[in-house]
Image (cartoon, rainbow, N blue to C red):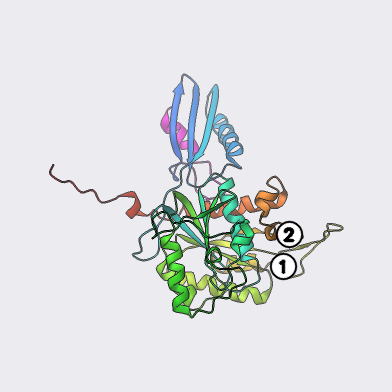
């Protein structure tokens, strides 16, 4: 008769395609029950994956059924997201398990569009997600998520995030007129941004996506050093010029010990809106070559498609505008891969083991 060790041995032979770990070593076996020769298994992933839970459950069932003598096998797949280690001695933000910085090193490569769709895709996969627009000089997220108006403050000291499309969002764009320039020096910008991060009353976030400003100067470096970040995503196009700056962004995170979860190659091909013909107008293979050079994952490749621009400009980004479309599915795949890469990073012990104080009563 099969026992727990038999099932564990079979799960040790099943590799999660997104993490590269087998389910046993990943500690994904959350529950196990036998009823004679019938088996019920609970698999718990460390990342949100609603889009593939059913398929993964079927694949695990087939694997267990083929390797064991079970009359019936039932597998249930769910997720539990934990906090992961941040750089240095920084302490994670209250009510935020993980901060993921999205950077490019260069403007104009679609970083903000990728950020908002990544946040929405993580939410669609089952996570509670926030989005912080860190570009003080050129805030674009309020328009992209279709939100406006000043945020509320219940206590006069902290501010409530604006809710849009299920995301908790914050941006300096909510506090100023859209056409008002921010004529500030670097230290003022850094201080304002840190206040936006720490004074916003985030609520139970699994992930806070930070849409970083372009560049790798003092502001970006200060943020990377002072904001507790669990991982970073680099956005680039295949073009050599964009790749040069993207590499600088990647090296910046390496210098401050923030793991780079992977690279998103945006505008990989141009899709003609009339005939559907695809053409790599910005070159080919740049993102893949960069990923190989720095031993990180290529999380996905996105086309230069007019719908992405139109939908984002209208305040209804692609993931919510066409949730069942091919573009939205591409973003969701990138979101799963991003979260899966983070799930294999070390956990944050400061969150796992809080200080316990015993007092005489």
> Measured from the top left, where is residue 41 in percent x and y?
48, 31
Going 53% across and 24% down the picture, which residue do you hit? 70
- Residue 227 location, quadrant: bottom left
Residue 116 vertical placement versus 66 (above, below)? below
> Measured from the top left, where is residue 357 in percent x and y?
20, 49
Going 46% across and 41% down the picture, which residue do you hit? 28
Q: Report if residue 1 is visible in the image.
A: no
Residue 12 is inside the magenta segment: yes
Q: CA distance from mark 2 to mark 1?
A: 25 Å
Secondary structure at badge 2 equals: helix
Label 1: which residue?
A: 284
Residue 100 versus residue 240: which sits nearer the camera?
Answer: 100
Q: Which residues are magenta?
A: 3-23
> Measured from the top left, where is residue 129 in percent x and y?
52, 51
Residue 166 versus residue 87: which sits nearer the camera?
Answer: 166
Label 2: which residue?
A: 310
Residue 48 versus residue 360: which sits nearer the camera?
Answer: 360
The number of numbered discs placed on residues in the rendered structure image is 2
Secondary structure at badge 1 equals: loop
């Amino acid at each position: 008769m099969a026992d727990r060790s038999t099932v564990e041995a079979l799960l040790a032979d099943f590799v999660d395609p997104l993490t590269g770990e087998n389910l046993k070593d990943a500690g994904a076996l959350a529950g196990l029950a036998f009823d004679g020769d019938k088996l019920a298994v609970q698999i718990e992933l460390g990342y949100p994956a609603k889009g593939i839970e059913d398929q993964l459950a079927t694949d695990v069932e087939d694997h267990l059924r083929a390797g064991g003598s079970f009359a019936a096998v039932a597998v249930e797949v769910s997720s539990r997201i934990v906090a992961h280690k941040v750089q240095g001695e920084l302490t994670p933000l209250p009510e935020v398990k993980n901060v993921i910085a999205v950077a490019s090193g260069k403007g104009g490569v679609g970083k903000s569009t990728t950020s908002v769709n990544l946040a929405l895709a993580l939410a669609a996969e089952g996570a509670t997600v926030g989005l912080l627009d860190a570009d003080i000089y050129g805030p674009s997220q309020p328009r992209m998520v279709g939100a406006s108006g000043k945020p509320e403050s219940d206590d006069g000291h902290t501010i409530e995030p604006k809710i849009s499309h299920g995301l908790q969002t914050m941006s300096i764009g909510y506090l100023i007129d859209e056409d008002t320039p921010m004529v500030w020096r670097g230290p003022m910008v850094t201080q304002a941004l840190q206040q936006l991060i720490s004074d916003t009353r985030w609520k139970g976030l699994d992930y806070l996506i930070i849409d970083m400003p372009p560049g790798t100067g003092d502001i970006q470096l200060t943020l990377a050093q002072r904001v507790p970040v669990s991982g970073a995503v680099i956005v680039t196009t295949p073009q050599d010029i964009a790749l040069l700056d993207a590499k600088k962004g990647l090296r910046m995170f390496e210098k401050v010990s923030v793991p780079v979860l992977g690279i998103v190659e945006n505008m990989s091909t141009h899709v003609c809106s009339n005939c559907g013909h695809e053409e790599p107008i910005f070159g080919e293979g740049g993102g893949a070559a960069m990923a190989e050079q720095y031993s990180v994952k290529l999380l996905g490749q996105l086309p230069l498609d007019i719908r992405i621009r139109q939908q984002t400009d209208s305040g209804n980004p692609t993931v919510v505008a066409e949730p069942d479309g091919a573009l939205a599915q591409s973003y969701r795949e990138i979101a799963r891969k991003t979260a899966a890469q983070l799930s294999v990073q070390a956990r944050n012990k400061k969150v796992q083991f809080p200080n316990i104080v015993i007092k005489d009563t």
